[in-house]
Amino acid sequence: MPPPPTGRTAPSRRKTRSSSSGTAGASGCLPEHTLDAYALAIEQCADFIEPDLVSTNDGVLVARHENEISGTTDVADHPEFAYLRTTKTIDGTTLTGWFTEDFTLGELKTLRAVERIPDSRPANATFDGQFEIPTLQEVIDLARSSRTCDGKVVGIYPETKHPEADGTLGEPSPVVDDAHEEGLLVHPYTFRRENRFLPREYRIGTDPNAPGDLEGEIQAFLAAGIDGFFTDNPDIGHRAVEKTTAH
């Protein structure tokens, strides 16, 4: 079996054209992470759509750029949710706002998406308030019912955001085995060597910008059965693969 792919470029289905629509569908034309943006990306000949995923309070995965949603929804215009505004530390950064994990799916479905960077994309902001927050299942259903410009099935490259709450790697979950049973490939990303990006047990020293044990982290994921990964440090990634496949 060949070693898993590494690097910052997504695996390509063809050599003649990019096989990914980016991180959020046609987000240069419509507010990102909406079904309409994904559908437009498919119409514009994307082969893959990539939803960023966060969880609701009742355990449903939804498509949002981050779990803090004050900049991507109209939640501030909903006085009934004012009590949910809070301050949290997310991946070492203190944020004040509204967080998806404090909402049920039903509550989130009453919100509407807004353009995340309206100063850069003012035309997109004209669509503010028109689109719901989609669930992962709704994105999957869209992909299954769509075809690429050359008639193939549309692929999905979901990215889960902020999954390790206490900053540790934790024990392997059944997610890789479950994905493989469904015929899916698992490519985690992005692996980076600086301590600030590593689980606590793989950090070396206290400087957040100092290099930690990236090789050890990647080896742990390879041992869990992943099919490949993305990294900003391909040399370290290659070394981890070499040592893993040598055993």
Image (cartoon, grey):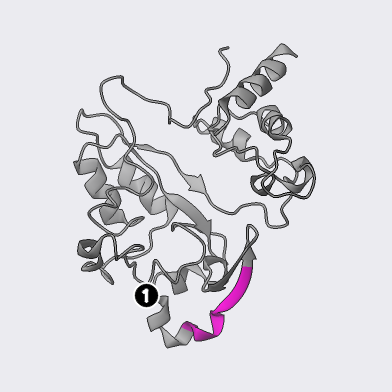
- Between 122 and 126, the one lying in front of the other is 122
The magenta region covers 81-88
Q: Please state which of residues 151 and 94 is positioned toward the viewer in this rendering.
A: 94
**Residue 96 vertical position relative to residue 83 in the rendered view, above or below:** above
- On screen, residue 196 above or below 107: above
Q: Give whichever of 178, 117 is nearer the camera.
A: 117
Q: Where is residue 236 in the image (x, y as percent from the top left)?
A: 64, 26
Specify the amino acid type for callout 1: Asp
Q: Residue 224: x percent and y percent?
A: 68, 32
Residue at image position (58%, 78%) is 86
- Residue 24, image x and y in percent? 36, 49
Question: Would residue 128 be found to the left or right of residue 110 on screen?
Answer: left
**Magenta stretch containing residue 83, yes or no?**
yes
109 horizontally vs 195: left or right: left
Q: Does the magenta stretch include residue 237?
A: no
Q: Which residue is drawn at 42% across and 76% down?
A: 75
Q: Which quarter of the figure has residue 32?
A: bottom left
Q: Where residue 52 sits: x, y (%)? A: 45, 51
Quarter that holds the C terminus:
top right
Give the labeled residue for mark 1. 74
